[in-house]
Image (cartoon, rainbow, N blue to C red):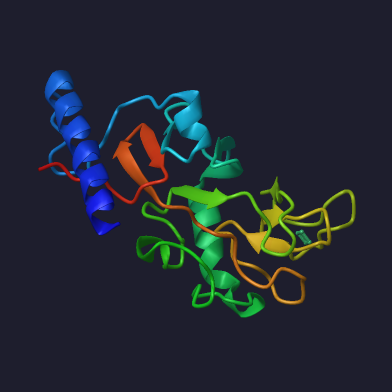
Amino acid sequence: MGEEIDRGRRQLLTAATTITGAVGVAFAAAPFLASWKPSARAKALGAPVEIDISKLDPGAMLKIVWRGKPVYVVRRTPGMIESLASIEDRLSDPRSDISRQPEYAKNEQRARNPEYFVVLGVCTHLSCAPQNRFGPGASEDGVLSADWPGGFFCPCHGSKFDVAGRVFKGVPAPTNLEIPPYVFIDKQRILIGVDEVRVG
Ligand code: FES
């Protein structure tokens, strides 16, 4: 089994090395990129998915599907990032101690880069897709009160999460939204599904 994994990993790394050589791009200092495009079948089986974030405006969110699940990428504004520090006492797991995320996302922003938030769009209660409700304050539909700081709202049973996917106290969801593995390929692209791709 271990040998199979090692062989697979070697093949992946070889492929990445080959592509790198062909492209000839110098990203040596960064956790490395593989600019390959998986087939539709490979994507369905869980291959990493590349996201272009070059046109994502501050305060906006885009969605993609990885392993059949929605993944949200939010470009947070400075105000959204600042809001994270002021609401910890309203959260069930502010330090993400009982929630699921890679080690590099176990911080206040739950991200590699505070500006870009990558999260599974799957409520930790019963797996509905939370909606983005980034605007602070009371909502017109009455489900969010005046002290709402902005975040995600799950319409199924009313769970609420901040803009780092941290769950508020008193809602059915038991833990923060899950963070998938991901890596920045460069300033404009994120690869979902892997923590890093090493070369050599
Ligand atoms: S599935 Fe989200 S609150 Fe129940």
Q: Give the farthest residue toward the bottom.
A: 89
Residue 129 in view in this figure: yes
The one of 194 and 43 positioned closer to us in this rendering: 43
Residue at 22% over, 54% down: 3
Residue at 71% over, 56% down: 127
Q: Quadrant of residue 162?
A: bottom right
Residue 43 vs 139, above or below: the answer is: above
Q: Position of residue 193 (x, y in %)?
A: 42, 45
**Is 8 situated left or right of 129 in this image?**
left
Q: Position of residue 68 (x, y in %)?
A: 60, 40
The one of 91 and 26 positioned closer to us in this rendering: 26
Residue 72 vs 89, above or below: the answer is: above
Q: Quadrant of residue 175?
A: bottom right
Give the total number of marks visible in the rendering.
0
Q: If the image is split into quadrants, where does the N terminus sit? A: bottom left
Q: Position of residue 188 (x, y in %)?
A: 36, 31
Residue 197 in view in this figure: no
Residue at 76% over, 76% down: 170
**Is 75 situated left or right of 12 in this image?**
right
**Is 152 situated left or right of 96 in this image?**
right
Ligand 1 is in which quadrant of the figure?
A: bottom right
Q: Give the farthest residue toward the top.
A: 22
Residue at 9% over, 43% down: 200
Q: Position of residue 134 (x, y in %)?
A: 66, 49
The one of 174 and 141 positioned closer to us in this rendering: 174
